[in-house]
Image: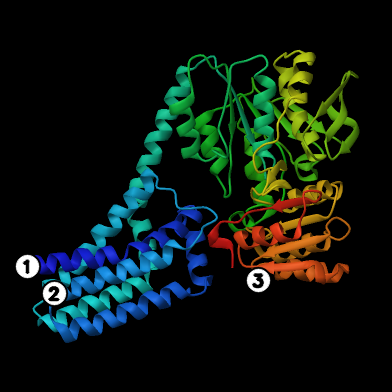
């Protein structure tokens, strides 16, 4: 193999980088899971960038055959790479690709695979013109089928990733076992996990050295990273958020973390694409309670009909929390909600009444606070310390978080919307001053009922919202249908193609006296 041929192969492999990076980006946004990624690939429309790259590649193939000069071919491929890179660099992503160790391993496997294929072609006895033609056609096919190649890379790296996961999970179990006096609290639910976790952390920090899983680190690797890098001997309490979007994931996390206390915040229609049924969701979330040690304690949302009617297959003690049901051990009463926060009383089963106030917005946050109160009292935290911590609570990032953007008043509820969250958000927006704007791409991962829930979301906007900005022409159709059926004035509904376009529009239409709600901020893979 000549130096020119080696350089040609390397340059051709380099020319695949922008397309490969995009495919890997979408694979990451689909959580590296083929059951998510494959339907996305099959359903997504061919982008203009694919046509652009294929057209240029076709020109290069023809010129390679005609010229038969390797260095000229190399120059043409480098020119193609530069042009495509400039073209793609103008694309702004909602959530950019994160170069993790896993992504790095996938890039290495991808390029080893590509170079092996291209090198094998050069070993076939062909004239230079036919060899270049064969190489060019192969590269063209790779461009067109880049997402399917990423699937192959995913399958090839899956065994290694499984080994890496198992190693870190064993290490996490070992570290936690060494912290024998650590109080570990697990939190799960269809929604409300992260907010409840943050509130729990703040309240318990008034009496204990407390560690929580940061942001939305609720997967096995997120939890192992927290334990390995952040857990110190000084910590007395570990508050661990545990997420699940398919059957058996809570069991895996419970086996790794082994919490003494468990909380189930809510059970509802979330991740139905992977759970398939509401019953599967309920059974999975309730493993948080069922797999606790008998010396521990579970805390459940007793207002939730699904949770309340579920037969817990364990004799672990359970504390009931709610705002409505009279049999709760901790119940919120006399709730007063304003656009500046909430005031309410906590009434315990033995009749004690404790007034509390918070800056957090929305009735649902009273429930989130009740979980922290119940656990704190179980750990004998003083009422005065609880009340002080709750009064000082700050909004969790991207969860009904008041902020100023572009000089405008924004309520940021951009994290992963669901029917319950959307309902709460609209109630909060209804209380806000000025013209009330809503920016949303709608909800995803609700299975066959996704369109139905989005249509209901649109119908519920009337009398809560004045101006609606929808992201994604096709994705927002069910919301538009709900708006029209409710009698909403469609002259005040605007449809844009991206979050950045929505922000540009809001800058033109809103004033500092108005209120803007951002409900959900979908990754690039879901916006179309």
The residue that disc 2 covers is 70
Residue plotted at (52% across, 29% down): 257
Check disc 2: other Cα within 10 Å, few if <14, some if 14-19, many if 20+.
some
Find the distance from the CA under tag 1 to the CA under tag 2: 10 Å
Please say if the residues under marks 1 and 2 sit with CB atoms less than 8 Å apart: yes
Residue 2 lies, in percent from the top left, at 6, 67
The residue that disc 1 covers is 2
Residue plotted at (15% across, 65% down): 7
Find the distance from the CA under tag 1 to the CA under tag 3: 52 Å
Residue 91 lies, in percent from the top left, at 48, 63
Residue plotted at (78% across, 29% down): 370
Q: How many marks?
A: 3
Q: Secondary structure at mark 3?
A: loop
Check disc 1: other Cα within 10 Å, few if <14, some if 14-19, many if 20+.
few
Query: Quadrant of the rendered structure where residue 360 is?
Result: top right
Tell me which colouring the rendered structure shows: rainbow
From the image, state whether disc 1 or disc 2 is nearer to you. Answer: 2
Depicted 412 relative to depicted 124: above or below: above
Q: Secondary structure at mark 1?
A: loop
């Amino acid at each position: 193999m000549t130096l020119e041929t080696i350089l040609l192969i390397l340059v051709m492999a380099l020319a695949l980088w922008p397309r490969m990076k995009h495919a890997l980006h979408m694979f990451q946004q689909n959580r590296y899971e083929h059951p998510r990624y494959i339907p996305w690939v099959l359903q997504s429309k061919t982008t203009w960038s694919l046509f652009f790259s294929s057209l240029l590649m076709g020109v290069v193939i023809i010129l390679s055959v005609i010229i038969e000069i390797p260095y000229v071919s190399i120059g043409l491929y480098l020119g193609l790479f530069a042009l495509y890179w400039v073209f793609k660099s103008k694309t702004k992503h909602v959530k950019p690709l994160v170069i993790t160790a896993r992504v790095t391993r996938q890039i290495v496997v991808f390029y080893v695979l590509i170079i092996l294929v291209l090198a094998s072609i050069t070993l076939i006895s062909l004239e230079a013109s036919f060899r270049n033609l064969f190489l060019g056609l192969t590269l063209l096919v790779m461009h067109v089928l880049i997402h399917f190649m990423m699937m192959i890379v995913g399958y090839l790296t899956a065994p290694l990733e499984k080994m890496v996961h198992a190693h870190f999970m064993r290490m996490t179990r070992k570290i936690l076992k060494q912290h024998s006096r650590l109080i570990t609290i697990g939190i799960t639910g269809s929604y409300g996990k992260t907010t409840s976790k943050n509130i729990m952390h703040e309240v318990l920090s008034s009496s204990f050295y407390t560690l929580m899983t940061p942001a939305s680190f609720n997967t096995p690797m997120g939890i192992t990273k927290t334990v390995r890098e952040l857990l110190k001997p000084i910590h007395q309490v570990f508050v661990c958020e545990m997420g699940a979007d398919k059957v058996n994931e809570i069991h895996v996390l419970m086996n790794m973390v082994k919490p003494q206390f468990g909380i189930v915040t809510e059970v509802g229609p979330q991740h139905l694409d992977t759970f398939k049924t509401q019953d599967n969701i309920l059974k999975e979330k309730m493993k948080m309670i069922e797999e606790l040690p008998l010396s521990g304690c579970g805390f459940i949302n007793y207002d939730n009909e699904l949770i309340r009617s579920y037969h817990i297959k364990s004799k672990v003690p359970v504390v009931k929390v709610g705002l409505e049901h009279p049999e709760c051990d901790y119940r919120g009463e006399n709730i007063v909600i304003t656009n500046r926060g909430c005031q309410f009383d906590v009434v315990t089963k033995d009749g004690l009444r404790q007034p509390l106030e918070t800056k957090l917005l929305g009735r649902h946050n009273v429930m989130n606070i009740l979980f922290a109160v119940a656990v704190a009292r179980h750990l004998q935290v003083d009422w005065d310390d609880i009340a002080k911590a709750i009064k000082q609570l700050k909004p969790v990032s991207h969860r009904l978080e008041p902020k100023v953007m572009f000089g405008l008043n924004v309520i940021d509820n951009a994290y992963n919307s669901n029917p319950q969250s959307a309902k709460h958000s609209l109630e909060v927006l209804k209380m806000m001053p000025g013209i009330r704007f809503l920016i949303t791409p709608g909800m995803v991962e609700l299975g066959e009922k996704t369109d139905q829930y989005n249509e209901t979301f649109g119908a519920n906007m009337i009398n809560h919202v004045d101006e609606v900005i929808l992201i994604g022409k096709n994705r927002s159709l069910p919301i538009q249908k709900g708006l029209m059926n409710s009698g909403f004035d469609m002259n005040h509904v605007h449809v844009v193609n991206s979050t950045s376009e929505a922000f540009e529009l809001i800058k033109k239409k809103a004033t500092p006296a108005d209120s803007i709600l951002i409900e959900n901020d979908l990754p690039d893979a879901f916006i179309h």
